[in-house]
Amino acid sequence: MPQPPLPALEPLPQSFFAHPTSVVARNLLGASMLRRFGKRWVGGRIVETEAYLHEDDLASHSARSRRTSNASMFEAPGTVYVYPIHAKYCFNIVTEAVGLGAAVLVRALEPLWGIEVMMDRRGQRSVERLTSGPAMLCQALGIDRSFDRHHLHELKDLKIVAGDVIDERDTAISRRIGISKSADLQLRYFLRGNRFVSGPRHWHQA
DNA sequence: AAAAAGATGTGCT
DNA sequence: GCACATCTTTTTC
């Protein structure tokens, strides 16, 4: 399968993230996430996200009081929030407005550019296990805690850029994966039937 | 100070 | 499908 051409490296504007978190999570589907290693841009398109709200959401890290560990969530929209979990990292982008504490978790990419680079970073696995999970994609793209609390506009080696518009028919919504609190909320967004969506097969359909 | 939990992933059965 | 490695943060004693 040939590697498609790189999209124009024009980052999504900050205003893209200054909207209700569920809207941002939905609209991030189809956008591209790109990481530069030296001369090369590697990454793919976003196929799965989750919204974490600033109120009435006990699963959100902002549901606890503001601390140094979750401070990034209260920064301006477009700020990166990277947090550690089970000796790995997950990547979020702050949404809505400064001071609120809302963000979108990027859960899975469809790998498109520099697949062999990501394979190396992941330690030679099947392409389905390359970026199909929040910690997998961070490892594949070399995202660690040094990215935390930086704004996307100041990160020269990491870009989120617009992709094709996704038809509503091709999207689906479900409960979020791996949480126990506020587990009933329908805040997971993904491309229906896409093979790079995370989790077991039954999570690939709504 | 100690223990448990956690927005996870892997490997083995 | 299930157990467990792994480590930071949070909760409990």
Image (cartoon, coloured by chain):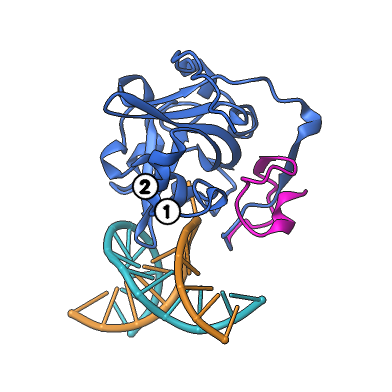
Chain colours: A blue, B orange, C cyan
The span picked out in magenta is A181-206
Cβ–Cβ under 8 Å for marks 2 and 1: yes
A129 vs A84, nearest the viewer: A129
Amino acid type, residue under disc 1 in the picture: Gln
Q: Which residue is mark 2?
A: A120
Q: Where, by quadrant of the figure, is residue A190 drawn?
A: top right
Residue A178 lies, in percent from the top left, at 57, 60
Vertical placement of A19 versus A196: above or below? Answer: above
Query: Mark 2 falls within which chain?
Result: A
Q: Residue furthest right?
A: A169
Residue A8 magenta = no
Q: Is residue A26 left or right of residue A136?
A: right
Q: Is residue A127 left or right of residue A72?
A: right
Residue ID at (46%, 38%):
A115
Q: Residue furthest front?
A: A1
Q: Which residue is mark 1?
A: A124
Q: Where, by quadrant of the figure, is residue C6 drawn?
A: bottom left
Amino acid type, residue under disc 2 in the picture: Asp
Instruction: Count all numbered tags in the image, as a single digit.
Output: 2
The mark found on residue A193 in the picture is none
Mark 2, secondary structure of its residue: helix
